[in-house]
Image (tube, rainbow, N blue to C red):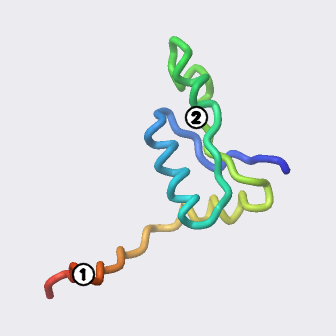
Amino acid sequence: MQLVTVFTAFNPAEAELINSVLDAAKFHSVVTHGLSALSLDGYSLAAGGILVQVPEDEAEEARAFLASPPGPLPDAPDNPVPA
């Protein structure tokens, strides 16, 4: 299984956030190069960034998912939004 980069971040928090969003959408994502990016003097820019990757067969759909605008958040059943 070949992994394909669908997002490049320059800080670990952003990479983990995107990874979590993809994971919640049932993609099989992983974060790579995080330690390398933070171990270099130039930080993540010198290492080429922190990569969020998915299997090759999910890459096109994952990119489309990340590019789509976010939908409205559902109302919590025990805390409805007042009208």
Amino acid at the residue labelled 1: Asp
Among all residues in the image, which is located at the extreme left? Answer: 82
Q: Quadrant of residue 62?
A: bottom right
Tag 1 residue: 78
Q: Secondary structure at mark 1?
A: loop
Q: Residue at x 51, y 54 (%)?
A: 20
- In this rendering, position of residue 45 left or right of residue 14: right
> In terms of sequence position, does the residue under pointer 1 or pointer 2 come before the other?
2
Which residue occupies the foreground of this view, 49 or 16?
Answer: 16
Amino acid at the residue labelled 2: Ile
- Whole-percent x and y of residue 66? 55, 60
- In this rendering, position of residue 74 left or right of residue 61: left
Image quarter (top left, top right, bottom left or bottom right) of the C terminus: bottom left
Among all residues in the image, which is located at the extreme right? Answer: 1
- Whole-percent x and y of residue 7? 59, 46
- Whole-percent x and y of residue 22? 57, 59
**Foreground tag (1 vs 2):** 1
Tag 2 residue: 50
Residue 52, placed above or below residue 35: below
Q: Residues within 10 Å of mark 1 (few under 14, many from 20)?
A: few
Which residue occupies the foreground of this view, 52 or 67?
Answer: 52
CA gap, disc 1 to disc 2? 38 Å
Residue 39, placed above or below residue 69: above
